[in-house]
Amino acid sequence: MKRTSVGDIKNLEGKEVELAGWVHARRDHGKIIFIDLRDRTGLVQIVFTPAVAGAVDLRLEYLIRVSGLVKKRPDSMVNDKLPNGAYEVEAKTLEIMNASEATPIPVDSDGYDINEESRMKYRYLDLRRERMQRNIRLRHEVSQFMRSYLTERGFWEIETPMLTKSTPEGARDFLVPSRLQPGKFYALPQSPQQYKQLLMVAGFEKYFQIARCFRDEDPRADRAYGEFTQLDLEMSFVTQEDILALAEDLFTKLVEKVFPDKHISQSPWPRISHKEAKAKYGSDKPDLRKEKNNPDELAFAWVVDFPLFTEQSEEDFFHGSGSAKFAPSHHMFTAPHPDDIPLLDTDPTKVRGLQHDLVLNGYEVGGGSIRIHERDIQEKIFNLIGFDEHQKGEFTHMLEAFTYGVPPHGGIAPGLDRFLFAVLGEKSIREVMAFPASAGGQISVMDAPSDVDPKQLNELHLKITKE
Ligand code: AMO
């Protein structure tokens, strides 16, 4: 017999079905034993009479296979709150496929009150809870929607290297030692920024990637430690307006399809200049919800007209020589507003950048810009942010690429995790990631990072010197 998903039970009254899933709850009424059986599609009540052997042995989280008859429950027993609340399955056979120890954390609650360390250590159990199953499913639906939306509009999904060179987005890099080139290191990309621009030079015109980004920076509720995912996209021959229009349409349709219960508070999305955002809301990512307690309201907004530079601070973990006064407010590839180019020589702080931030309910959900595609302007920016010859040398490939018929281009990279976190109103970004690192940077379930065999270190020409 073919396995039936629990979610299909409501359409199968009077049919014999075979189900396989976990014992979610158990109620022993003497002769009759009721089990709530769970698979990823939901819950259904199974009724075991004494005619079926083995039901007394069942414990929570046992994995079982049951065959039986789908029946309508008596009217008085119907539970309207559950999708299968009007039906139950009268068991004919039972097989315990795999028993379970008592789980170290409960999986039948929303999980918020369980200590996070235990949740992370037993993440494979934690993920069984309904809320986490829903979050991970929605994440899949969101990325699937993005893929097909962009594919239908002529974008190509192109992968870019993970073992690469530093792409400075303002955080520390993760380094990977090279075995074949002793003493040299790859950096894991903080984003595919340089590669996507090189893909525009290569003539692909419309690129996207559901891209993994690596940043060694302190985590926050809305910021994952170590790695996170962006919908990275880039287009040639476009204006900033084209990019905003595309992203706005994508997210509007995405919300309609994947989050039909949510409503977007204002459409078209308001556009606010950086200056106005700071002056009026005291934030460059204002929360524009009319009713802050309404979990279904989505207040998208664009923040534009950023200054190209901010004053460089001591802590700026940035590549400037230290003597420079300016740091890019977005990144060093953002184009200055064409009207402001003369100001680069006279008053750089007054130069506006063609940057755009996508804001949702007070979170920065995406950032992007029109890029510099002219070598001399790129060099000028490098100088203004205080790059010495060596630092400029690290970007020779970009400067050189900019000498071969480069199309004007620009793009944006909404954070997938950040978006889901904001839409779902989750307490932490880790609630929308399957295996997030803890605040201390551990992947507890695998106990990473870990010591390595001295042989491996030798091969990499590395020596650990502990203080
Ligand atoms: P930026 O650095 O602004 O731009 O990142 C874009 C978006 O990525 C998400 N994000 C994060 N999400 C979770 N955890 C983090 N640690 C984290 N850091 C960033 C946010 C953010 O808005 N290359 C440029 C994009 C471009 O110019 O096209 C970039 O990476 O949602």
Image (tube, grey):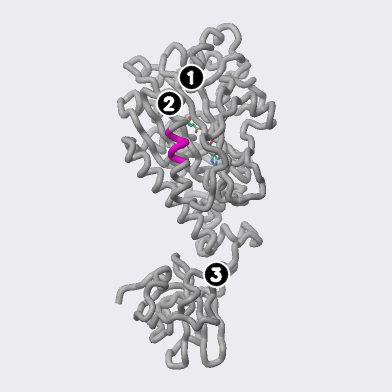
Query: To which quarter of the image does residue 21 belong?
Result: bottom left
Query: To which quarter of the image does residue 375 belong?
Result: top left
Above or below, 62 relative to 467 = below
- Residue type of the residue flagged with mark 1: Ala
Q: Residues within 10 Å of mark 1 (few under 14, many from 20)?
A: many
- Residue 436: x, y in percent? 53, 50
Question: CA separation, marks 2 and 1?
Answer: 9 Å
Judge left or right: residue 151 versus residue 422: left
Among numbered discs 2 and 1, the one appearing first in the sequence = 1
Q: Which mark is residue 410?
A: 2
- Residue 153: x, y in percent? 33, 36
Quarter of the N terminus within the rendering: bottom left
Among numbered discs 1 and 3, the one appearing first in the sequence = 3
Q: Residue at x 55, y 10 (%)?
A: 344
Among numbered discs 2 and 3, the one appearing first in the sequence = 3
Above or below, 107 relative to 145 = below
Q: Looking at the image, do the residues carrying marks 2 and 1 touch, with CB atoms under 8 Å apart?
A: yes
Instruction: Give the residue number, with chain letter if any, for mark 3.
Output: 81
248 is within the stretch colored magenta: yes
Q: Is mark 2 within 8 Å of ligand 1?
A: yes
- Residue type of the residue flagged with mark 2: Gly
Dominant secondary structure of the residues highlighted in magenta in the image: helix
